[in-house]
Image (cartoon, helix red, strand yellow):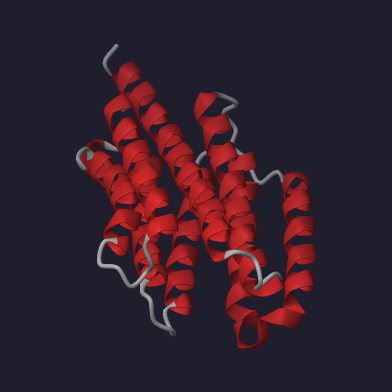
Amino acid sequence: MAKEIVLFVLFSIVHLLAIVTITKEDLFYLPSKIIPILILIVSLFRFFPSLEKRGKLVAVGLVFSLFGDSFLAIPKEGYFVPGLGSFLVAQLIYSYAFTIDSKIKPLLAIPFLLFGSSFFMVLAPKLGALMIPVGFYISAICLMGWRAASRNSISKPFYLGLLGALVFILSDSIIAYSMFLNREMDRSLASLGIMITYYLAQLLIYAATKTEELDVQSVKNT
């Protein structure tokens, strides 16, 4: 797993440098953005048949994240909603993955419900025609956070997955803040904040999944 993480970090840095040196119109921009996620996808799909159900779901969630990354990197109008839709599917898949072998734990939903409803109310006056899709997406990321917090196993994969979910929510919150609440925010600064937290979130969810898979394989081999 160490090799994949090193490659992921190196190519993530490449894209962060691309953010401050080139524009979306540059042919290198899209590949530099998606290569880190491709590394995680390849790492999981190499062993897809032997993965547990949660591992397979996370792998598929990464694929939909890749679609979302690609749509949002296209330097033309009209691709925000397809990108948002792709990430919404990814969040729902992650939510299902976190729900496996977990209890409902409704009390843990309260902080995510409070955050999601409050943030949506702040955003609502600025959303216009995007109110419904953004509302659905906020619901999806809060669902994902709740399910990550509700896992039964208090172990290293639990903490990695929960931290990944929380950082994912932070990343998406930065997107919403910079797009709807503070349009004057420096675009490079906003993009750096978004991508640093986004890459970290995906890496943490991947690490949680891979650690859990290694633990399961270790038990099977004993």
The answer to whether residue 68 is left or right of residue 108 is left
What is the quadrant of residue 153 in the picture? top right
x, y percent for residue 93? 45, 56
Observer able to see residue 102:
no
Give me the residue at 53% from left, 33% from top: 160
Give me the residue at 45% from left, 33% from top: 208
Quarter the C terminus occupies: top left
What is the quadrant of residue 12 in the picture? top left
Q: Is residue 73 above or below residue 32?
A: below
Q: Is residue 175 above or below residue 58?
A: below
Give me the residue at 29% from left, 38% from top: 51
x, y percent for residue 176? 63, 67
Observer able to see residue 93:
yes
Quarter the N terminus occupies: top left
For this orientation, the residue located farthest to the front is 21
Q: Pick the residue in front: 222 or 18.
A: 18
x, y percent for residue 220? 30, 20
What is the quadrant of residue 8 in the picture? top left
Q: How many marks?
A: 0
The answer to whether residue 117 is left or right of residue 216 is right
x, y percent for residue 25? 33, 73
For this orientation, the residue located farthest to the top is 222
Give me the residue at 47% from left, 76% from top: 80
Q: Is residue 144 above or below residue 205?
A: below
